[in-house]
Image (cartoon, rainbow, N blue to C red):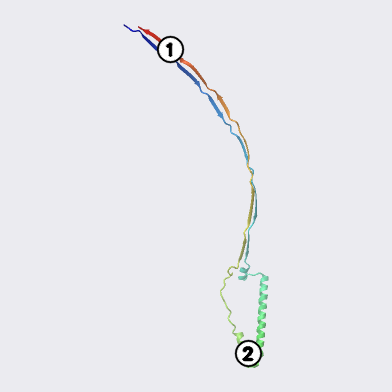
């Protein structure tokens, strides 16, 4: 004996999807930027340094003198020699007053005049050390400045946005199916 059988065949439903992607584009134009930098205001004041060199003593040490200095020195030297001469004549006159004392005064005076002391000579440096006088006053510099801020003008531009929405199409690609058979 055969037992009847039930045979079932099923088919699942299938869904299909077609998509169109969305599209978006963004463009950002450059901003308009204008920068202006005013010049800083600067004032500078300078007092120059001062150098003074006095070499008068060095020239005098080398016997290079102005006419007024030479006349002044010669007058002083002449006056000094005159005073020395007057003193010598006065001293010799006083000695002559003692001629009756028995001393030979004239011979002594003649010996002194004939045998004068030798002139003292020595080596000297010409010009003498530190005979050039140097004096320096340093200069001064005063700097004043005033800064100025930059002038900035910025104009922004909005972005250009373009958007196309996407689409999704959903459909049944395969319908479901159930087939039942009875087999004997």
Taking 6 as reference, is 133 above or below it? Answer: below
Image-based side of 11 in relation to 146, left or right = left
Q: Which mark is residue 105?
A: 2
Q: Which mark is residue 38?
A: none
Nearer to us in this view, 25 or 3 = 3
Give the quadrant of the N terminus: top left
**Residue 71: image location, x then y, percent:** 68, 73
Q: Nearer the viewer, mark 1 or mark 2?
A: 1
Nearer to us in this view, 59 or 35 = 35
Q: For the residues marked 1 and 2, what is the alpha-carbon distance in whole angstroms?
A: 179 Å
The residue at which mark 1 appears reads as: 177
Q: Which of pointers 1 and 2 lies earlier in the amino acid sequence?
A: 2
Q: Crowding near pointer 2: few (<14 within 10 Å), some, many (20+)?
A: some
Number of marks in the rendered image: 2
Determine the residue positioned at 49% across, 18% down. 170
Determine the residue positioned at 67% across, 80% down. 83
**Residue 113: image location, x then y, percent:** 61, 85
Taking 53 as reference, is 123 above or below it? Answer: below
Q: Residue furthest left?
A: 1
């Amino acid at each position: 004996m055969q037992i009847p059988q039930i045979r079932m065949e099923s088919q699942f439903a299938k869904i299909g999807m077609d998509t169109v992607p969305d599209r978006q584009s963004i463009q950002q134009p450059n901003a308009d930027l204008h920068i202006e930098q005013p010049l800083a205001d600067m004032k500078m004041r300078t007092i120059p340094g001062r150098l003074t060199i006095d070499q008068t003593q060095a020239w005098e040490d080398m016997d290079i003198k102005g006419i007024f200095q030479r006349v002044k020195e010669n007058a002083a030297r002449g006056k000094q020699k005159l005073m020395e001469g007057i003193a010598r004549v006065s001293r010799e006159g006083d000695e002559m007053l003692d001629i009756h004392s028995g001393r030979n005064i004239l011979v002594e005076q003649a010996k002194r005049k004939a045998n004068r002391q030798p002139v003292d000579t020595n080596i000297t440096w010409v010009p003498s050390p530190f005979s050039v006088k140097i004096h320096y006053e340093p200069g001064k510099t005063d700097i004043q400045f005033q800064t100025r801020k930059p002038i900035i003008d910025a104009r922004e531009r909005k972005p250009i946005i373009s958007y196309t929405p996407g689409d999704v199409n959903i459909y049944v690609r395969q319908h479901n199916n159930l087939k039942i058979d009875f087999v004997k």
